[in-house]
Amino acid sequence: PEPVPSLTTWHGAGASATPDDVHRVAAEFIQLAARYATPTTELPAVADVLARTLLAVADVDLTDADAVRLGPQGYARLLRGAVQGADRGLSPEAAWFHDALLVSVCLHVLHHFVRRSRHIQHQMPGHASRIRQLVDLDDAEATARSPEHPQEDADFEARYAEDAIRRYGWLTIVGVDLPNAPDRWLLEDTYLSLEAEERTEDAEKTGTTSPSNGQRTVLLADRALDGHERVLLLGPAGSGKTTLVQWLAVSAARAQARVPFVLPVRRFAREGFPAPDDFLHAVRHPLADEAPEGWVVRTLLAGRALLLVDGIDEAPEETRGKLRDQLRRLLRVFSGNGCLVTSRPSAVEDGWLSRERLSEEGFTQLSLAPMSRDQVTRFVRDWHAAAMGDEQSGRDEQEREALRTYEQRLLHSVRIYRELRQLATNPLMCGLICALNRDRSGSLPQGRKELYEAALEMLLQRRDPERDVLYADDVRLQQEPRERLLRKLAHAMLEDGVSELPHRRVVDILDGALPSIPAARAEGGGEKIFRHLLHRTGLLREQAEGAVDFIHRTFQDYLAAKEIVARGRLHSLVAHAHRPEWEEVIRMAAAHARPEECADFLQRLLSAAPELRRPQVNHRRLMAAACLEHVTELDPSIRQLVHDRTKYLVRPATDLAARSLGWVGPIVLELLPDPEEVPGDQQALMLALTATRVEDDAAIDYLARLRTRSSLAIRAELARPWRHFDTERYAREIIAHLDPDGLYYPVSDTAELAALRDLGGRPRIQVAGVIPTADLLSGLDHTQLTHLWINAQPTDPDMSWLSRFPNLRVLRVNPRLPRVRNVPEGVTITA
C-alpha cells in the first residue's frame, strides 16, 4: 500500500501540476456530466467546490488500499468532510449534482489505484473485482443517459439484422461439391435440429437415472435458450456447435426480439474479451464503423442482446481463465441478456466454469448429444437431396438415380456396420461419409484414420476433376505437395495455440516451405500458392478481413498430427499428453507413426513424470492405452507393457472415475476384471459405468455378464446406453434380459421403440429422445404401458393422445421441460 498524497501530481516537491490544473480538470468533468444530466445554473460554483474537494485528495492521510476498502461512496464522503465549509454555498439541486459526480470521479480514481497496484489486485481481489464492475456499470449508464438516437439506432439495427441473415444464413455441406451444384445451401433448408443433454448434479454423482436421483434431460439444442438465460454448450469437434450459433443468430435477427452478437473467440483470444463498444471491431464486422456510438451498450442495458460466444476452446489455455473472468464481469454488469458459450468438453474439464460457478453465474451446462439413428437417416436424405438439387439444377435423371442408389446403400451400411455407426455421430462426420460414399460408389473406408485419408484424397486430388474444373488457375499440384503445404499451416496453428492465422503469416509460412517442395516451388510464390490452396482444395477459408483457418478444426488437428510425425517429433507430444485438448492430435499422430517411433512414444507416455500431479500422470498413461486402438503395428512387448502399467488404473473407486475410463476405448475392456467375479453391487456398478461408455460392440459381450444383477442402479445403467449400440443386438442380448421391476426403459428413437415393442412392450417407458407424438402413439404398446416418463422435449405439449393407453396410471414429466397440457383424467402427473 502507498500513501495517496504521494500519488498526486500537484502535491510535494517536484509537482508536475498545480491547483489551477485541478480546477481546469474539475471544470471539464462538470461539462461532461452536464451532457448526461439536467444542467444547473450554478455550474461555475459546482466546479469550484469540486476542485476544492479533489484537492483534498492530497490532504487526507490514508493509503490507496484504504481508499479502495472505503469504496467510491465512502471515499467521496471522506473527501467532502475534509473540505472547509460544510455548507459549500450550493443549492440542494446543485449539491446533489456535485455529490453524484464526485462519487463517479472517486470510482474512477479507485479504479486507477486498482490497475496500478499489484498488491491490491492480489491481496484484495474481491474489492478489486467490485471496483471494476462498478466502473463498467457507471460507464454503461453514462452511455445510456447520452442524447438518445432512437431512429438512428432502429435504422442501424435493421441493417445489422439483414446482414446477420445474409452472413449466417448459409451452410456448406461437407462433400456436396458436384458439377452444376452450388457450393452452399440455405441454412433453413438443411439445418438439422440436434439434441442437447442436461444432467443434474445428483445424476452425475450416482450415474443413475432413477426418479429419486438425478436426471438426464434432453432438449432441442436450438431451443435451449428459450428456458435458460445463459448456457454453456459442450460438444466434440464436428458436433454442430458453430452451425447452431449460426441458426440462433439468424433466428434472432428474423424475430427481432434480440440482437445477436456472434463472437468467435479465435478473433480476440489473445487480446481478451472485448468491451461492448468494441464487439463489432473485435470480430472485424463490416458494419463496425457505421454503428451509432453507444448502440451496443444501449442494447445490452435494455436486455435485448444475444451473446453467442463460439469456441472458448480455441483460445490458448493460459488465456481462458482471463476470458472467463472478463465474460463473468460483463454478464454481471449487463444482466438480462441471453448468452451461449460453446466449447469442446476438454477445454472446461479443468474447471473453466465449475459446477459451483455455473450456478453462481446463472449458467446451465448442456452437452450436444450424438446424432440419433433417426437424425442420421434424416441427414443422409437431406444431404443427397441437396446433392441432387431441383429439376433445374442441370443434373440428368441417370445421375439423380445413381445418387438415390448411393443413399439407400449408405442407409443400409450405417445400420449394419459398427464402424460406420460409431463414426456417424455428428454432422461433420456424416457429411464426410456421404461424400465418400458417393465418391467411391458405395465403397467406404473403415476407421477414423482411413476416413480422413480418403476425405483428403477426395478433396485434394479428385475435387476439381469431379467438378469438371481443370484449368481454374495455372497452378498444377497433385495431392502430395498440396497436403504437405496444408500440414505446415496446421502445424503452425497448433504451435501458436490458435485456430486461424493472419493472411500475411500464411503467405510467409508457404514462402518458407516452398524451397523444400520442388513441385510447389516451380508453380509460384507463397501468395499464388495460397490462392490455389484456398480455392482448389476446399479445406481453407479466408474471412473478409483476411484471417485464414481450416473449414473445420478436425482437419487442422489431423494434418498437424501428420506433420509432427513427418518431422520426427512425435516425442514432443509427450509434454502435452496430460492435456485433454491434445487427445485427437496425439491419437492421430500415433496412428501415423512408424512402429519403432510409436513404441518409443508409448514408453515415454508410461514413464514417470515428477513435474506432474498424479491425475495428470494417470491421464497420460491412459492416453497410451487409448493410442493402442489406432496403432496398426506394434511390438507385442510394448503392448503388454501398456497393459501392465494401466491395469491398476481401471479399478475406479468413484463413479466419476469409472465414467472417465470410457474415453480410452475398447482396450479398456481387456483391462477390466471379470464382472462375474465381482461380488458387490457397488463394484459391479463401477464396471457398468465404464463399460457402457465404451461405444464398441465388444462392450455388449462384457455387459451381458452383468444383465442378471438385481440392483436397480445397475439395470438402469445397462438400459441407458442402448442408443450407442446396434439396436437389435442390444435389445436381444441386454434389454430383453433386464428385470422390469421398477425399471424405466429408455427409448431415444423410433428404432428402439420398434425393438421394445417386438419384445412385447414394457410397463415403464422413459422417452429419452425427441420423438414425434405420432411415432410414440404407434410405437408404444397400448396395453402394457402403465408408467410414462417424459425426459425429452415433446414435439407437442398436448398430451390428449395418452387417452389411447387404458392402463396408464402415472405420467412423470421432467420439470425442466415445457409444461404439458390436456393430460387425461385418471393419470397422475409427477415431476
Image (cartoon, rainbow, N blue to C red):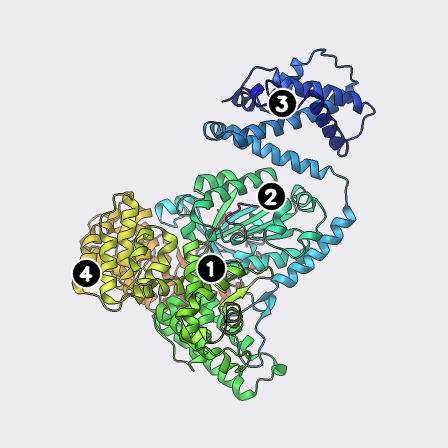
Which picture quadrant has residue 252? bottom right
Mark 3: few/some/many CA within 10 Å (<14, 14-19, 20+): some
Secondary structure that dominates the magenta span: loop
Q: Amino acid at mark 3?
A: Gln
Closest to the camera, between mark 2 and mark 3, is 2
Label 3 – label 4 distance at C-alpha? 68 Å
Disc ID at residue 275: 2
Whether tag 2 and tag 4 are in contact, CB under 8 A, the answer is no
Nearer the observer, 212 or 34: 34
Q: Is residue 152 visible?
A: yes
Crowd around label 2: few <14 · some 14–19 · many ≥20 (10 Å): some
Image x and y of residue 98, in percent: 73, 23
Q: Residue at x 30, y 54 (%)?
A: 574
Task: Give the residue number, with chain letter if any, for mark 4.
Answer: 638
Label 2 residue SS: loop
The answer to whether the residues at label 3 and label 4 have Cβ atoms under 8 Å apart is no
Do the residues bearing badges 2 and 3 touch, measured as CB atoms within 8 Å? no
Residue 32: x, y in percent?
74, 32
Q: Which residue is mark 3?
A: 73
Rate crowding at label 4 as few (under 14), some (14 to 19) or many (20 or more) other CA atoms within 10 Å. Answer: some
Amino acid type, label 2:
Ala
